[in-house]
Amino acid sequence: TDTSADALRTPIVAVLGHVDHGKTSLLDKIRGSAVIEGEAGAITQHIGATAVPLDVVSDMAGELVDPDDFDLPGLLFIDTPGHHSFTTLRSRGGALADIAVLVVDVNDGFQPQTLEAINILQNTQTPFIVAANKVDTVPGWNPNEDSPIKPSYDAQSDRVRGDLDDRLYAIIGELSDQGFSADMYWRVQDFQNNIGVVPVSAMTGEGVPDLLAVMMGLSQRYMKEEMAIDVDGPGVGTVLEVKEERGFGTTVDIVLYDGTIHEDDTIVVGGENQPIVTEVRALLQPRPLAEIRTESRFEQVESVGAAAGIKVAAPDLDEAMAGAPIRVVGDRDLDEVIEEVRAEL
Ligand code: GTP
Ligand code: MG
């Protein structure tokens, strides 16, 4: 095929799992920031989106990811809440995703929202890997900051390794009870039919290189065809949040998962009573690695292609709803687009 690198869509990676199992911390480690410190009671209450460019992925993954092997632009991570009251947000995150990371605390194992997340991934047929998080809490663990997991695991005492193995095999057993064949990721050849388990620590960064490498491999191997979609087509996305932005009035934070959105485009957004037809006044892009939920400094851009988290400023967005579709009309028939948005509400 002759698709150039910038015609490839950024894969969307949803991070799912039970409350407090470390989803936001894991993303913080990748972003090199600390979003949980800014969260009410350290509980995620909204879906977030963070773009991680390929060079950052390859820097963090070290020798595990050679950027020359990949023509994906990077990864767009979607953070979801684990608290039981946020089922809708978890499903929305799962439905948006091309691939997912299921975060499981090695001490707690499978919990109710772990199972709920698995059901969402099964229903949406989303390929996923398991991040077995908090390996640093195994008593006697000897940390190796930001190291790939295998050398760090091999350097632990026999007793510590045995303790961790017990916990990891319990997780593999739970996956098998749910009908998945799973194994340590380094023994998995075919990630489409087997679930790879990656031991990690969001605290020490151990295993994070492996996690990034597996996600890049999974995206590149199994999703290439789907990614090479026409990102030049009219933009399609989902509203994450409706927010006031000083100087712009009511804006919507969206995940654009297909096509491109431009300034001045006519858009149709799902609203409380009926679809809203309006025109894009400004597109506000978070800085690379910034979480759109907490970002305060946006860069105004003329257009943006999928996949991306972007703030859209436009008149008449007061009745827009989180979870609603947003579609660029482009050269299509306006009534047809309005009907599509109505059907998705
Ligand atoms: P919700 O968004 O509420 O579902 O939680 P979450 O899954 O995003 O968990 P979060 O990242 O907020 O982490 C919960 C707690 O676990 C925090 O106190 C973190 O510091 C701690 N934590 C997360 N990952 C690790 C880890 O790898 N090791 C240790 N020791 N603590 C961790
Ligand atoms: Mg969180």
Image (tube, rainbow, N blue to C red):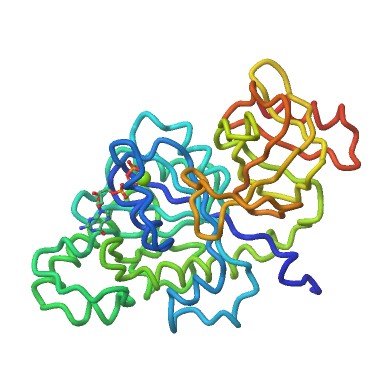
Left or right position of 136 against 15:
left
Quadrant of the rendered image holding ligand 2: top left
- Taking 2 as reference, is 90 above or below it? above
| Residue at 68% from the left image edge and 37% from the top image edge | 313
- Taking 228 as reference, is 19 above or below it? above
| Residue at 50% from the left image edge and 59% from the top image edge | 289
Left or right position of 18 against 126:
left
* Image quadrant where one finds the C terminus: top right
Q: In this view of the protein, which residue sits in the foreground, 191 or 90?
A: 90
Q: In this view of the protein, which residue sits in the foreground, 69 or 222?
A: 69
Q: Quadrant of residue 330?
A: top right
Q: Quadrant of residue 153?
A: bottom left
| Residue at 64% from the left image edge and 23% from the top image edge | 318
* Image quadrant where one finds the N terminus: bottom right
- Taking 95 as reference, is 317 above or below it? above
Q: Position of residue 104 (x, y in %)?
A: 30, 52
| Residue at 39% from the left image edge and 72% from the top image edge | 210
Left or right position of 156 against 190:
left
For the view shown, which residue lies furthest in the top direction? 273
Q: Position of residue 270 (x, y in %)?
A: 68, 27
Q: Position of residue 188 (x, y in %)?
A: 41, 72
For the view shown, which residue lies furthest in the front direction? 247
Badge count: 0
